[in-house]
Amino acid sequence: MTNFKDIFKRSFIEGFSRYDMTPENIIVCFAIATVLSVYIFAVYRIMTRKTFYSKNFNIALFAITEITTAVILAVQSNVVVSLGMVGALSIVRFRTAIKDPLDLIFLFWAITTGIVTGAGQAEIAFVLAFILTISIFILDRLPIAKAPKILMVGGEGKDFQKKITETVKKYCSFYTVKSCAINNGHYDIVVELRTSKESDLIEEISQIEGVTSSSFLCHNGEVTY
């Protein structure tokens, strides 16, 4: 007599064995995963043109897509293999520090692509690639705010800081003195500012009596509102 336990066990095992694991299907899955992983590799290379580019991390994205595809194919082929895979992967720890949040996006993109491709739903992977590519490129070029510049001035003399701030005020609607260090009468002043007349400002500051050095620094980091 068949009880509920037998019915549940049969349906559970059959649910994992419905996927047609023919050699042709496996080759197609890996071919699609390879195309998408190469695409992720190219997009990551283009997006990191202005920042620190790690070729090893980019290669890892390619490999992660392929490995995840193999794992999902193996999980679907046999319920025993899937349980063993869960136990084996549970001891894996990713300890590499992610320096850029964008790297985390590409990491999850590679993993997700491998999962849906291995599950035989490659159309989801292609739609995801299209949406992510368009979104990332648009948001990357969207002007949210203009990053401030850093003016560094060194020199000495009476009312030196006052002369510098008065000159900066003529060219900038916004400025903040971030630091002012004095060592034996020598001033080192750092000013955060926003201006479109950098050359005029730096030229006038260099002509102030007592100025020994002046320089502008720009950055592509976080913007403070």
Image: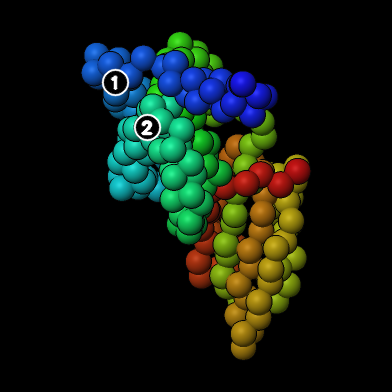
What residue sits 46% from the left and 54% below the top?
Answer: 92
Q: Position of residue 86 (x, y in %)?
A: 49, 44
Q: Quadrant of the C terminus?
A: top right
Number of residues whose C-alpha sits closer than 10 Å to that of mark 1, classed few (under 14), some (14–19) or many (20 or more): some
- In this rendering, the answer to whether 142 lies above or below 67 is above
- In this rendering, the answer to whether 131 lies above or below 69 is above
For label 2, the residue is: 74
What residue sits 51% from the left and 36% below the top?
Answer: 108
| Image-based side of 124 in relation to 46, left or right | right
For the view shown, which residue lies furthest in the front direction? 1
* Residue 132 in view (yes/no): no
Q: Give the alpha-carbon distance from disc 2 to disc 1, as whole Å.
A: 10 Å
- In this rendering, the answer to whether 215 lies above or below 136 is below
Give the mark nearer the N terminus: 2 vs 1: 1
Q: Quadrant of the N terminus?
A: top right
Instruction: Identify the disc placed on residue 146.
Output: none
**Amino acid on which disc 1 is placed:** Ile
Q: Position of residue 204 (x, y in %)?
A: 58, 53
**Amino acid on which disc 2 is placed:** Ala
Classify residue 123 by image quadrant. Answer: top left
Secondary structure found at label 2: helix
For label 1, the residue is: 26
* Residue 92 in view (yes/no): yes
